[in-house]
Amino acid sequence: MCRWLAYSGTPILLESILYRPVHSLIDQSLHSRLGVETTNGDGFGVGWFGSHKDTPAVVRDIGPAWSNRNLREIAGHVRSPLFFAHIRASTGSAVQQTNCHPFRHGKWMWMHNGAIAEFHRLRRHLVLAVDPELFPSMEGSTDSELMFYLALTFGLAEDPPGAVAQMAGLVERSGREHGVEFPLQMTVAVTDGQRLWAFRYSSERHSRSLFYSTRVETLRSLHPDVAFLNEISDETRLIVSEPLGDLPGAWNEVPEGMYGVVQPGTDVLLPFAPRAA
Amino acid sequence: MCRWLAYSGTPILLESILYRPVHSLIDQSLHSRLGVETTNGDGFGVGWFGSHKDTPAVVRDIGPAWSNRNLREIAGHVRSPLFFAHIRASTGSAVQQTNCHPFRHGKWMWMHNGAIAEFHRLRRHLVLAVDPELFPSMEGSTDSELMFYLALTFGLAEDPPGAVAQMAGLVERSGREHGVEFPLQMTVAVTDGQRLWAFRYSSERHSRSLFYSTRVETLRSLHPDVAFLNEISDETRLIVSEPLGDLPGAWNEVPEGMYGVVQPGTDVLLPFAPRAA
Amino acid sequence: MCRWLAYSGTPILLESILYRPVHSLIDQSLHSRLGVETTNGDGFGVGWFGSHKDTPAVVRDIGPAWSNRNLREIAGHVRSPLFFAHIRASTGSAVQQTNCHPFRHGKWMWMHNGAIAEFHRLRRHLVLAVDPELFPSMEGSTDSELMFYLALTFGLAEDPPGAVAQMAGLVERSGREHGVEFPLQMTVAVTDGQRLWAFRYSSERHSRSLFYSTRVETLRSLHPDVAFLNEISDETRLIVSEPLGDLPGAWNEVPEGMYGVVQPGTDVLLPFAPRAA
Amino acid sequence: MCRWLAYSGTPILLESILYRPVHSLIDQSLHSRLGVETTNGDGFGVGWFGSHKDTPAVVRDIGPAWSNRNLREIAGHVRSPLFFAHIRASTGSAVQQTNCHPFRHGKWMWMHNGAIAEFHRLRRHLVLAVDPELFPSMEGSTDSELMFYLALTFGLAEDPPGAVAQMAGLVERSGREHGVEFPLQMTVAVTDGQRLWAFRYSSERHSRSLFYSTRVETLRSLHPDVAFLNEISDETRLIVSEPLGDLPGAWNEVPEGMYGVVQPGTDVLLPFAPRAA
């Protein structure tokens, strides 16, 4: 499995989130507390929106994040109002750049922690469901990238929650047809550069961990002495596989079978259920 | 495109063929004379049969061969009676280990120079033709690997020339259906550890270069002073994308639309034509 | 040897210089015209100053630049008013990140094309001349990095041309003491984020190629139709190992044994000579 | 720190030792029990003597061993009577091939777990003590490689224990002169292809773990049902950073401040002490 984080808010140096917290994503690459594996050393990626571009930059590499000097350099010099970061623990598919998250298609970015159970048996069936126009853009061999292209096929650009629901529905139906009891296990983040959706779902209703940060206003009143909270806007939000530290009141679990939308104005948390594709 | 060589004969240190000749494959990685590109620096691979194993070892990496120290070490210490080596110049697909040749399935090894024209348009159709049982074993995104799995689908293990002919037939039919004038350009080597088949074919009848070495007995009489020729058996044979040196009489072009079989006893050269799959 | 470029001027996406010109640095990585080698595929680096930081970011990797997707991503999303880029052709030292240019120390960045002749014989003597305080910061095994640390030892921070002259003087004296006729061959660029110095020198007075771009005002009057020239300030300047294209009047050779200073106000071109250290 | 193993005995596929044991070195790369770090993912190396060569092959790479397919291939196809394997956890120096163990000089191979304390302060002084003739052969930036070249300087080829003792003596003296209380922490293996020496020592007399395997004859009588023990000769011996499994009676700790010699005839275990260089 993997660990990831998504940031939306005040433009900030990536290192402020990736390296500085006590239990940062880089620390999690060596010492994950809540993940299936302790070590997430099979590649990493970071994707960020800048101020001048419609499409995000995506930098991915195949070694461990903890020793990658280029990631350290980028994180120390790039500011972004919206970025994804992901560290990978392969469950068998090749350690290669095209299997690293986040995945990008146009302005859309996607990352995932989880798995399609018995993916080797279901893969062909699911690949066939991808829009033939999109098919040539798939470059890797992961379930995660395929889930992204299925969601794109089902209209991610128009209705992200609906498209993800249809993707999940197809995976579950395909799984059941192949005799797989619990086909889907996922925490997914997806963005178009304006809004950010994060999903927590699994067929067995026992999903991988997912947390969102408390509203900044609330945190400021709880912790008036934490300087960082005064540097970020009220709209700033983090979604993470596991908390980046132990600040009381800072982290809230995304409930089982829910998804959140981080957006201008009020963020929302809504129920998620797979839907027939 | 790419450059490759296949060796069959007296067990020999890989470096004798990979590094020592004047215009060795390593030299070709920087200065190819007959290839479409001068530089072949987008990954490499070597696969060899040992004395104790039924399946070949395959070592592949993503950097240039010319600076790879591990390849140099292996070539200097491993002996083999049958090995493949390949240097890659990507025409667009990702530079990753799973896109490097040779490809292996069980005891079968495959490598390729050439391309399926407009592969991004034909790929989905061809992928669907792969035996669903074999589908999960494909890991990369190249036309070369897909051609291998199509040949396996069409019975490579029973009738290699027939299976390759059916693969070529399917590619050409699929190409024509998509309006591609010359769908296939290929020089392919394939082996099961006992025999070695090498194909030269292209839809436009203007195929990439391919050469085979002259019979060792003949070469010895031509060049009684070349010590190397006394160290190798009469049965030793090389198939190469381009000659490894300028020894007069040493290299013969595989004619357009032909394939050769290197095997115990007399080697043969036969006509090749695609066949309806 | 290698190829490099240095840009100073209007903040610009790196790709405008690294990828878009006809004979861009990326093109030079495969098809250098004026270099000692045609192929520069043994690693690359890019270093840039941003708007918020005193020290430059430096991203380096060991494969060829032409196929590196992360370099493409960074170049397409990062703007900078002052950046270096370098592609490497190793003359023997290991292909590893710590041997890739540019090198950085504090706010100083350094890159080099050329060589210290018979470096393996002179290296120990030169290493001993590095300030013991600076010694632990050297990480690689190249002559280029060592030249940087010698220049730092000789006061690069106070007087860049003087420090480079002393470094060159030491190399030449050390070379002569070891019986090396022409010890130094160099084109060097160095910057502190405010000014940029570029040196062309060799012991044999036959130095590697080095060019600087014509004043933007002059180019605009010569080529009123070249849109790019209207997007950059009068102060914009490029120093390159070889011209990025064939625009008449755009490129001027740095004369043998000279150095240039790109700075606020008038740039200057001055004679360079090694000096006793 | 790191983990390593050294094998001497019946020629065997490397995978028999590297992959098959319950707590193999590959398992240790993710889940070390006795090491300072749980994860050893900053590069690896394997060096082996073959039947035809005087010098060992050394294959090293910068990613984690656990996901490296080339290591898996080599281990599955190469047999050797004497090989080293090492997995690295960097304590700061660059993750690069030239910093991976084992190191080789001629027929000599060296690997190390431990550290020279405050190496950045002692390094220059120690580097100066390396024989100027050997100096150019050092390629990396680790304390481990430098210790090897110091031992070579002090006559490793003639008297391995004496040379290692002088190296340790120099490190301790240099450390004390720089105010370092416990300068040296080491478990070292070194071989010339005929004999194998393994040292356990630390200035604080609290050294990293090191074990040797029990005599095969004894193990056979203890475990008559373990088939593997009947496939290897009486002379077969393993030295390891931590036991590869839980077979009762199989592993013995190398005592503090001792070294062992694995050689034709009776192996020996002797006291080790640093000596004035």
Image: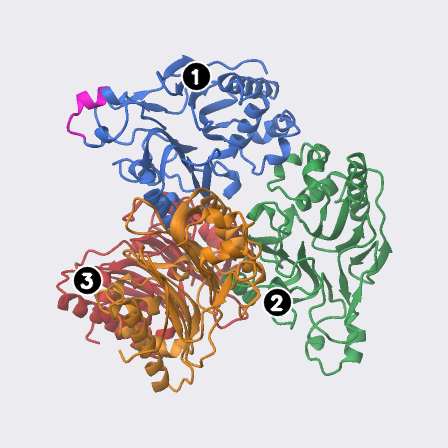
Chain colours: A blue, B green, C orange, D red
Q: Quick one: label 3, few (<14), some, or many (20+) residues within 10 Å?
A: many
Give the magenta range: A218-226
- Which of the pair D248/C225 is nearer the observer? C225
- Discs 2 and 3 share one subunit: no
Quadrant of the image occupied by residue D9: bottom left
Name the residue type under label 1.
Arg
- In the picture, the disc for residue B27 is 2
Q: Looking at the image, which residue sits at the far front? A: C221
Query: In the image, what residue occupies the spot 45% across and 55% down?
Result: C217
Left or right: residue A119 versus residue A87 is right
Q: Is residue C55 above or below residue D57?
A: above
Element assignment for label 2: helix
Name the residue type under label 3.
Pro
Q: Is residue A85 above or below residue D115?
A: above
Is residue A118 at all visible to an observer of this figure? no
Q: Position of residue C154 (x, y in %)?
A: 25, 71
Residue with the mark numbered 1 = A205
Query: In the image, what residue occupies the spot 53% across and 32% down?
Result: A106
Residue with the mark numbered 3 = D183
